[in-house]
Amino acid sequence: MPVVAWVAAGGCVSQGPASGHGLIPGADWSSVRLVDLTHAFGGETIVWPTEQEFRLVIQQAGETEEGYYYASNRIEMPEHGGTHIDAPIHFSRGGRTVDQIPLEELVGPAVRVDVRSRCADDRDYRMTIQDFVRWEAEHGRIPDRAIVLVETGYGRFWPSRERYLGTEQRGRNGVKALRFPGLHPEAAQWLVRERRVRAVGIDTASIDYGQSTTFETHVTLLSHQVPVFENLANLDRLPDRDFSVIALPMKIAGGSGGPLRIVAVLPVRSKP
Ligand SMILES: [Zn+2]
């Protein structure tokens, strides 16, 4: 299906004749709803324990001598802090840098796979192939080339570092103390081989679980040119399927990742 058709339908092409009319050009935006999956960047932005904090440095804010108001800031931040994308080169030598990822890889039909109940009492939970098989038994097959969003429920802990990351420690000791769920490398393999996923996102700080030391899930996805979205917000406001995602990172030349504005496009009537 062409991109314009699924965006038009808010991903709900299976739901009848109202869907499928091209949104672009001549979009009927009144038939869709947007959900922002992005945490705002600011003083509370959670970054990896070894990274520098996000900083907004106010340079100008006030009336000028010429009589107009003028505000202008500088930002300082790591590529991989807050809601961001991992470009393939992040864990794969020779992989695409963030500016080289084709736009077509960043927008598409999406599903939300809810594993909140498994992660609630197990901070080290790694999502398995079985979780996806179970999801498909209930909701139907994950479409090929979908964007798969994994909901651990940890997004609700933001911006508490203690609850979200499992530790407030910084530096290398902070990395060792990370405790949050992620995606098992075997499940990542399955998504790549069996469902040819377009991209994978998660509402934690890393697609590998916090205790990972080898980052096999990153390696698996990124070595297959599958971008990863991390620190996603508001996944609880999505339906399980029949929506689309538009994920547009800052186009940093040579970047291994970068800040990401990511939104879901839903049919107006969809729940929740
Ligand atoms: Zn990252």
Image (cartoon, grey):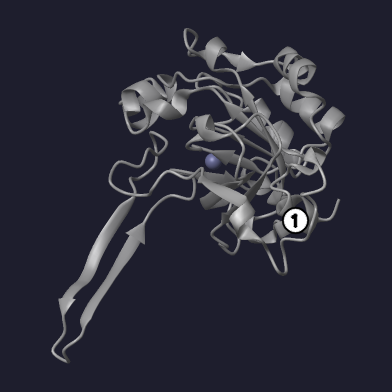
In the foreground, 248 or 8 = 8
Q: Is residue 97 visible?
A: yes
Quadrant where the C terminus sits is top right
Seen in the picture, residue 267 relative to 169 is either above or below; the reply is below
Q: Residue 122 at x, y = what percent? A: 50, 9
| Residue 174 falls in image quadrant | top left
Q: Residue 89 at x, y = what percent? A: 66, 48
Disc 1 is placed on an element classified as helix
Residue farthest top in this picture:
121
In the foreground, 230 or 232 = 232
Query: Amino acid type of disc 1?
Result: Glu
User: How many marks are shown on the rendered structure?
Assistant: 1
Residue farthest bottom in this picture:
66
Seen in the picture, residue 187 relative to 38 is either above or below; the reply is above
Q: Is residue 102 visible?
A: no
Q: Is residue 142 left or right of residue 256?
A: right
Seen in the picture, residue 57 relative to 244 is either above or below; the reply is below
Q: Residues within 10 Å of mark 1 (few under 14, many from 20)?
A: few
In the foreground, 259 or 255 = 259
Q: Residue 32 at x, y = what percent? A: 61, 51
Write the residue at 51% across / 42% down: 37
The picture quadrant for ligand 1 comes to top right
Write the residue at 75% across / 17% down: 138
Write the residue at 73% across / 44% down: 11
Seen in the picture, residue 24 relative to 144 is either above or below; the reply is below
Residue farthest front in this picture:
17
Q: Is mark 1 within 8 Å of ligand 1?
A: no
- Residue that carries the numbered disc 1 in the rendered image: 104
